[in-house]
Amino acid sequence: MEQKKKSSYISARESRKITRFNRKVTRKLEAQRADANKDPKLYTTKMKDENNVVEFDNMCTYFFTDVGTVRAVDGVSFEVPKHSTVGVVGESGCGKSVTSLSLMQLLQRPSGQVVGGEIRFNKGDGTAYNIVNTPNSVMEDIRGNEISMIFQEPMTSLNPVFRIGDQVDEVLFLHHPDWTKEQVKARTLEMLEMVGIANKEGVYKMYPHELSGGMRQRIVIAIALACSPTLIIADEPTTALDVTIQAQILDLLQNLKEKVNSSIMLITHDLGVVAGMADYVVVMYAGRVIEKGTASDIYHHPSHPYTIGLMKSKPVVGHKSDTLYNIPGNVPNPVNMPNYCYFRDRCEMRCEQCNGDYPPAIKINDTHVVSCYRYIDKGEVLGYPKAVNVEEL
Ligand SMILES: Nc1ncnc2c1ncn2[C@@H]1O[C@H](COP(=O)(O)OP(=O)(O)O)[C@@H](O)[C@H]1O
Ligand code: SF4
Ligand SMILES: [Mg+2]
């Protein structure tokens, strides 16, 4: 919805107008989705590249809230190749979690909606799901079996009133209804051992509160891996843990990835976390991808002024400094995004061109893509992110 006023104050009249608009749009989107859900042709598509597990293609996820439309993710495109780790980095609120929740179809509906673009998930038989239109009955099968998720706070994923063993068993039973009780228990113990739990028989009988934070996160990882998923989404998996435990959990994830042969989408606000682990890095800012490339592209040749700022604000071992660099200014309001570069008001390298439209994505080498006018003559222009005009929905 077009917001002409600069002030964030909303009159009763405007508020009613927003509510009416939200109701109309979300009803329409839900009806369209219900129609698309009925016909497998409408949620079956083809991958652009068979070597990818997931392809986000200009995905837009908006929240229709009482204060207006929040453009949480606005035209995001990136891929997760098979058997690789992709780090998705950006400061809090830039749309990392919304991107992963859109892929799992776990958005808070009807207010949260994928309003544009495609999310392709490789079926492995030459076709792909377009997750945006996939019905819930199919999603239930995909979640856990094909894609599983590890959240920041392990206690939110574990049920405090059930024993650890029962919680891992339950997931296995759900996905292998034909297994016997003994088979399931044996597999659970095997999983506990795999995630580095020494006293597996003892832990099998414990409740979550009897374990430390690091141990609980190991259990959550065991549950996530129980069905050997093709893709593991780890959303800030170590943010709630101490630094030494963080390193252990990241090592564990990396080792297990090789064992289970899956890909990882590692979401974090901390560039240091993805440094040793990711093959590819995607940097997000205010709901858009501003730079992406191999880990080496991003770490050795950060190109977008925001990424350069992020790298400067990271402490370096062996490098003495009294103060850490701090990127000045704030992220723009997601209800009222400007039409020029979202980073302009904070950018120390802006030039005349930056007052124009939002910059296009520019390919500066085979793997490295940057959205910034500084590179406009230095590579192939790939195109502009496509925002959705909600008035036309
Ligand atoms: N349920 C919701 N309703 C309204 N806005 C939301 C909701 N969930 C997320 N947002 C907004 O979407 C943006 C991106 O959020 P999120 O993806 O959670 O950020 P992060 O990168 O920290 O994971 C934020 O501006 C946030 O306020
Ligand atoms: S486009 Fe301009 S304002 Fe935006 S990041 Fe690049 S130099 Fe800065
Ligand atoms: Mg988040």
Image (spheres, rainbow, N blue to C red):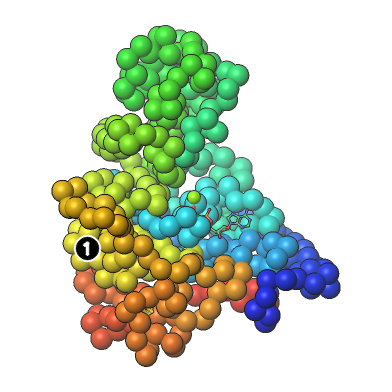
Cβ of mark 1 under 8 A from ligand 2:
no
Q: Residue at x 67, y 53 (%)?
A: 109
Q: Secondary structure at mark 1?
A: helix
Residue at image mark 1: 297
Residue furthest bottom in the image: 352
Determine the quadrant in which ligand 2 lies.
bottom left
Residue 199 image position (x, y, % from top left): 35, 11
| Image position, residue 247 (x, y; %) | 29, 36
Q: Is residue 311 visible?
A: yes
Location of the N terminus by quadrant is: bottom right
Q: Residue 250's quadrant in the figure? A: top left
At label 1, the amino acid type is: Asp
Q: Would you place residue 222 above or below residue 166 in this image?
A: below
> In front: 140, or 198?
198
Q: Nearer the viewer, residue 119 or 254?
A: 254
Q: Give the image quarter of residue 327.
A: bottom left
Q: Is residue 72 above or below residue 151?
A: below
